[in-house]
Amino acid sequence: DAGVIQSPRHEVTEMGQEVTLRCKPISGHNSLFWYRQTMMRGLELLIYFNNNVPIDDSGMPEDRFSAKMPNASFSTLKIQPSEPRDSAVYFCASRGAGGAYEQYFGPGTRLTVT
Amino acid sequence: AQSVTQLGSHVSVSEGALVLLRCNYSSSVPPYLFWYVQYPNQGLQLLLKYTSAATLVKGINGFEAEFKKSETSFHLTKPSAHMSDAAEYFCAVSVNTGRRALTFGSGTRLQVQP
């Protein structure tokens, strides 16, 4: 079975540029999560979708960040304009409707903003 | 709200020695508990989960964890460490109410010395 797919795996961009990270959740999963991981702050939940609807975006740092989930098989996280402090690894995770609510993580996108 | 505390940000053991990674949780309702492992430059992989069935949970790669309600703990153990166990380990908690998202601990980096 294919796991969570993220693209690109690495992204290097200059400050001020727009960055779009992509995620394809596991087929059949109905919840999707975006996380950010840094040495300083650890693993932070940015936003959580359930059935394609954003449920909790309280972790989104500021208006420069936006996330969409146009359908059950695709989500994007956009940063516009990007800043050096946005450099981090961004993970997408998905979860099925039943069970104990375990999440399955993608390999991450390492973003470097210079 | 639920929370997780992982005691010890770094743990070092010798190859063949017992691995013990500590996790304490706080939750006002019965929790679901998880351990994830993150190898360098990879996403988080589910090791094991507690879902209110058996208190001793066995996971992948020889790891197990015991849920102790009286101590609000869910420590991760492995009888004999392998070099390949070197990674970062995250404890997480979820509850069957509200947004049902995972709350992660700050992680413990395990080093295995030859």
Image (cartoon, coloured by chain):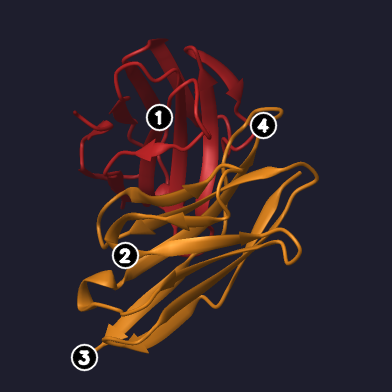
Chain colours: A red, B orange
What is the quadrant of the C terminus of chain B in the image?
bottom left
Q: Are marks 3 and 4 on the same chain?
A: yes
Q: Are marks 2 and 1 on the same chain?
A: no
The kind of residue on which mark 4 rests is: Asn
Q: Is residue A52 left or right of residue B73?
A: left
The kind of residue on which mark 3 rests is: Pro
The kind of residue on which mark 1 rests is: Ser
What is the quadrant of the N terminus of chain B in the image?
top right
**Residue B30, quarter of the rendered image:** top right
Q: Is residue A2 left or right of residue B24?
A: left
Discs 2, 3 touching: Cβ within 8 Å: no
Report the Cα–Cα distance between label 4 and label 2: 28 Å
* Residue closer to the observer: B94 or B52: B52
**Tag on residue A94?**
1
Above or below: residue B71 compared with residue B100? below
Report helix, strand or loop for mark 4: loop
Query: Dot 2 corresponds to which residue?
Result: B62
Discs 2, 1 touching: Cβ within 8 Å: no
- Answer few, some or many: residues within 10 Å of disc 3's Cα (few below 14, many 20 plus, some between 14 and 19): few
Report helix, strand or loop for mark 1: strand
